[in-house]
Image (spheres, helix red, strand yellow):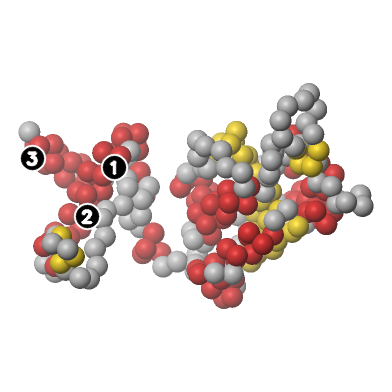
Amino acid sequence: MKFTVLTLFPEIVEGFFSTSIMARSLENGSIEGRIIDFRQYAEDRHRTCDDAPYGGGAGMVIKPEPLSAALDAVGAGSKRVVYPSPSGRPFDQEYASELASEKELVLICGRYEGIDQRIIDRYVDDEICIGDYVISSGEVAALVIIDAVYRLVYGVINEESLLEESFSQSLLEYPHYTRPYDFQGETVPDVLLSGNHAEIARWRLEKRLEKTKLFRPDLFEKAVLLDDTKKLLESLKKKKK
């Protein structure tokens, strides 16, 4: 899979692409990455990429000309174009899985008050909101989307690691423990040391249900519960009575 990122601050994206799992994925060919500084497509002497908004108001808006030229140069018309924006569609794990099936994503990093609406109307397929808050860096928002998507691409992460992560079956992930057994008087649950894989699986599922119900009741209500999960849930309800 290939990610093409259009940005005014390429150094932010370069840092992410050059570290950890992403760096290894680029090196082994599981992922391709391309960073485009669209300031280079501005034609005036000062490489101007922003201007005051029509209608007045605070802040500046990214001009359409340099972005349009950069998008045309990367062949955006035949690719899926993503624009992170607070006014977009909410991003979730299901959405990330959908995007992970694409051969290439082109991401536009906004700044200031955003980008000219005509770019969105003409080029953008997905206007995506990563959460109900506003940040100043479109690069950070784009990297959140990239990070959620690329790890789902075959060959990037061991598939077994993805099976019980948060949001699979609309449940949150269970707690994790490692050495030492005793940390400042707090010990690891005995079931995890038992070697009984069936009991460990049951404990983990129980913790997933408890945590989801506590922190994300909205997810809990739509969780896809298998028969054994339903039985465990019923036993938990009886235990609490």
Residue at x-position 57% and y-position 54% = 143
Disc number for residue 239: 3
Disc number for residue 204: 2
Q: Position of residue 179 (x, y in %)?
A: 22, 71
What separation in Å lies between label 3 and label 2 (alpha carbons)? 17 Å
Residue at x-position 26% and y-position 38% = 213
Q: Amino acid at mark 1?
A: Thr
Residue at x-position 69% and y-position 40% = 112
Q: Place residue 31 in its image quadrant.
A: bottom right
Q: Amino acid at mark 3?
A: Lys
Q: Amino acid at mark 2?
A: Arg
Q: Residues within 10 Å of mark 3 (few under 14, many from 20)?
A: few
Is residue 160 visible in the rendered image? The answer is yes
Q: Position of residue 187 (x, y in %)?
A: 14, 62
Residue at x-position 78% and y-position 54% = 38
Disc number for residue 212: 1
Residue 82 lies, with reference to residue 151, above or below; the image says above
Q: Pointer 1 and pointer 3: residues touching (CB < 8 Å)?
A: no
Q: Residues within 10 Å of mark 2 (few under 14, many from 20)?
A: some
